[in-house]
């Protein structure tokens, strides 16, 4: 059981159904969703980075890949799923200036491959709320910032990405530490939350905490501009660079 809970050992359909019966679970829809998750797991592109990047990087990519929708709040940086290679490289280098190129390059490549979940061939709904503050910060130079903003605008044009901006002059916004990602599961009970903590990324699955994250997203959303006004703001910022 400890190996299954740690994710180091798979669980068979038969054992899963026995465990559900032992725990008096009668929610057939939930059981079938769990069976599908247990039996349909396949190796993904993220496995190429096993032993190269921390395990949590692989876990995040896999969780995004299987999500039915993605909601995200980012305050200080452009969301990772929308970053350009130069922007991502600048952020990684600033946070970890000690990293040699042999370790920096895989981090950038991994982040770029994660973008496939919101790419042209993917139809996973993605809604992100980003603070205008993050769009002004030049993590590298003017050209990098200009190309980054254009990248966001291009992503919006694809149709399944919604970007909302919290303007810097918004009254009543106290969510400076509200950054998080919320990943939809096949059922609401199987949703997952991701929070960045001082000790690393934390995965949230407790229903009380998931409810709190859902409420947080709705609350922060009320402080943001609508998608059209947000796109116009980003376009204006890009022209000013």
Image (cartoon, rainbow, N blue to C red):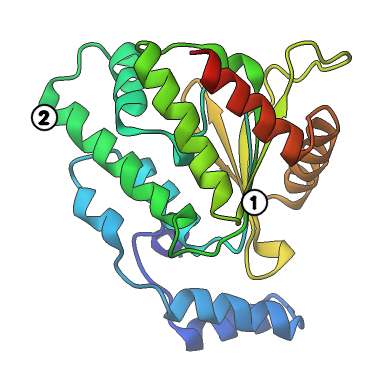
Label 1 neighbour load within 10 Å: few <14, some 14-19, many 20+: some
At 62% from the left edge and 84% from the top edge, which residue is drawn? 32
| Position in image of residue 161 (x %, y %) | 60, 50
- Which sits in the foreground, 123 or 238? 238
At 40% from the left edge and 54% from the top edge, which residue is drawn? 116
Label 2 sits on residue: 102
| Position in image of residue 208 (x %, y %) | 79, 46
From the viewer's perspective, is the residue at label 2 or at label 1 nearer? Answer: 2
Label 1 sits on residue: 205
Q: Which mark is residue 25?
A: none
Tell me: 224 left or right of 114.
Answer: right
Q: Earlier in the sequence, mark 2 or mark 1?
A: 2
Q: Residue furthest front?
A: 239
| Position in image of residue 195 (x %, y %) | 58, 34
Tell me: 50 left or right of 198.
Answer: left
Q: State the image quarter where residue 92 is shown.
A: top left
């Amino acid at each position: 059981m400890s190996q299954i809970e740690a994710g180091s050992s798979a669980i068979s359909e038969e054992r899963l159904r026995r465990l559900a019966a032992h725990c008096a679970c009668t929610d057939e829809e939930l059981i079938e969703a769990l069976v599908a998750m247990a039996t349909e797991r396949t190796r993904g592109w993220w496995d190429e980075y096993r032993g190269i990047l921390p395990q949590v990087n692989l876990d995040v990519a896999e969780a995004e890949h299987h999500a039915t929708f993605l909601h995200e709040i980012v305050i200080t940086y452009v969301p990772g799923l929308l970053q350009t290679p130069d922007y991502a490289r600048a952020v990684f280098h600033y946070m970890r200036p000690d990293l040699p190129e042999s370790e920096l390059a895989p981090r950038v490549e991994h982040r770029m491959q994660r973008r496939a979940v919101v790419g042209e061939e993917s139809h996973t709904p993605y809604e992100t709320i980003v603070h205008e503050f993050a769009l002004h910060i030049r993590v590298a130079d003017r050209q990098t910032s200009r190309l980054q903003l254009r990248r966001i605008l291009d992503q919006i044009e694809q149709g399944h990405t919604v970007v909302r901006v919290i303007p810097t002059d918004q009254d009543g916004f106290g969510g400076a530490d509200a950054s998080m990602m919320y990943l939809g599961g096949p059922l609401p009970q199987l949703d997952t939350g991701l929070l960045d903590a001082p000790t690393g990324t934390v995965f949230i699955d407790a229903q009380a905490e998931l409810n709190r994250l859902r409420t947080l997203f709705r609350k922060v959303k009320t402080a943001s501009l609508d998608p059209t006004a947000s796109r116009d703001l980003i376009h204006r910022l890009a022209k000013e660079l």
